[in-house]
Image (cartoon, rainbow, N blue to C red):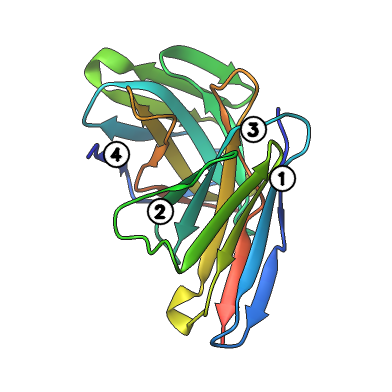
C-alpha cells in the first residue's frame, strides 16, 4: 500500500509557542490530505482537508487561526499549532489517498504535549 | 451528519477465540475501511471494503451497503490482535472525507 510519513512522532512544547507537524506521501502524489485529532480513548475527528495549492477546508468548530495548514506541494502538507495551550495536547494524525483515490492511508501520528 | 456506531465498545477474549465486530452507519456510503490502531497509535489498514466480502489470513470482512452495516471477523485471536478497531466511511458526495466509527477496544489475553 501507499506510504504516508508523519514527523515528529512526539513533541513537547511550552505554552505560547508554535509547533509544526509534517505529513508526506512518500511514493505517490496527493492533491488532498486530511488532518485528524484524537483525544485519549476517543475516535478520530476530522479537523481539516488540505488542498494542494489552495486554502484548506476546516470542519465546523476548528479554529483556522489556531491550526494553520499549508499544502505547498503534491507530497507535503504541514499543520502548525499556533500559540499552543495545554488543551491543544492531543494526538494528531494525517491521511492521504492513494493514486486511485480510493483507499486512505495514515501517517504514524504526532503526540503533542503542551506544558 | 452521518452516524457511525460500532459494537461492542469493549471486548475481552482469550487467545484462540473468534469474534465479530460490527459497524452500523446511518446513510449511503461509497467507501468503507477497517483499521486496527496499535498501542502506539498507528492506524493499520485492514480492509477497503465498500461492498462484498474479503479475507486476509485470520481476518475477514463483509459489507452489506444496502443494509448499512459491515462486519469484521477475527478468528483464532492472538495477543497481537489487541488494540482498537475502527471502521470509517465516506459519505457519497462528501469530497473524500472519512468519518470514523466509535471504535471497538479489543483485549486478547493468554
Dot 3 crowding, Cα within 10 Å, few <14, some 14–19, many 20+: many
List the residue tagged with mark 1.
A24
List the residue tagged with mark 4.
B4
Q: Looking at the image, is mark 1 or mark 2 nearer the viewer?
A: 1
Q: CA distance from mark 3 to mark 1?
A: 9 Å
Q: Do circles 2 and 3 both sit on a common chain? A: yes
Q: Is residue B73 left or right of residue B91?
A: right
| Image quarter of residue A104 | top right
Between disc 3 and disc 1, whose residue precedes?
1
Q: CA distance from mark 1 to mark 2?
A: 23 Å
Residue B44 or A56: which is nearer the viewer?
Answer: A56
Give the residue displayed 27% in from the left and 32% down from the top: B24
What is the number of the mark on residue A30?
A: 3
Q: CA distance from mark 4 to mark 1?
A: 28 Å
Contact check, label 1 and label 2, Cβ < 8 Å: no
Q: Looking at the image, is mark 2 or mark 3 nearer the viewer?
A: 3
Up/down of B62 relative to B83, above or below? above
Up/down of B55 relative to A88, above or below? above
Q: CA distance from mark 4 to mark 3?
A: 26 Å
Amino acid at each position: 500500500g501507499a506510504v504516508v510519513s508523519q514527523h515528529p512522532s512526539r513533541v513537547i512544547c511550552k505554552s505560547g509557542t508554535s509547533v509544526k507537524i509534517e505529513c508526506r506521501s512518500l511514493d505517490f502524489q496527493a492533491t488532498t490530505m486530511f488532518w485528524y485529532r484524537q483525544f485519549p480513548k476517543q475516535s478520530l475527528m476530522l479537523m481539516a482537508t488540505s488542498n494542494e495549492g489552495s486554502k484548506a477546508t476546516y470542519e465546523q468548530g476548528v479554529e483556522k487561526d489556531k491550526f494553520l495548514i499549508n499544502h505547498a506541494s503534491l507530497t507535503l502538507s504541514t499543520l502548525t499549532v499556533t500559540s499552543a495551550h495545554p488543551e491543544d495536547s492531543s494526538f494528531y494524525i494525517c491521511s492521504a489517498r492513494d493514486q486511485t483515490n480510493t483507499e486512505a492511508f495514515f501517517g504514524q501520528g504526532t503526540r503533542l504535549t503542551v506544558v | 451528519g452521518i452516524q457511525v456506531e460500532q459494537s461492542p465498545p469493549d471486548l475481552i477474549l482469550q487467545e484462540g477465540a473468534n469474534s465479530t465486530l460490527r459497524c452500523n452507519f446511518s446513510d449511503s456510503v461509497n467507501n468503507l475501511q477497517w483499521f486496527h490502531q496499535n498501542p502506539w497509535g498507528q492506524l493499520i489498514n485492514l480492509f477497503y471494503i465498500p461492498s462484498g466480502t474479503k479475507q486476509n489470513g485470520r481476518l475477514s470482512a463483509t459489507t452489506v451497503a444496502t443494509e448499512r452495516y459491515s462486519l469484521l471477523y477475527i478468528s483464532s485471536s492472538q495477543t497481537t490482535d489487541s488494540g482498537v478497531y475502527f471502521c470509517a466511511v465516506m459519505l457519497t458526495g462528501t469530497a473524500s472525507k472519512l468519518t470514523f466509527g466509535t471504535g471497538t477496544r479489543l483485549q486478547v489475553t493468554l
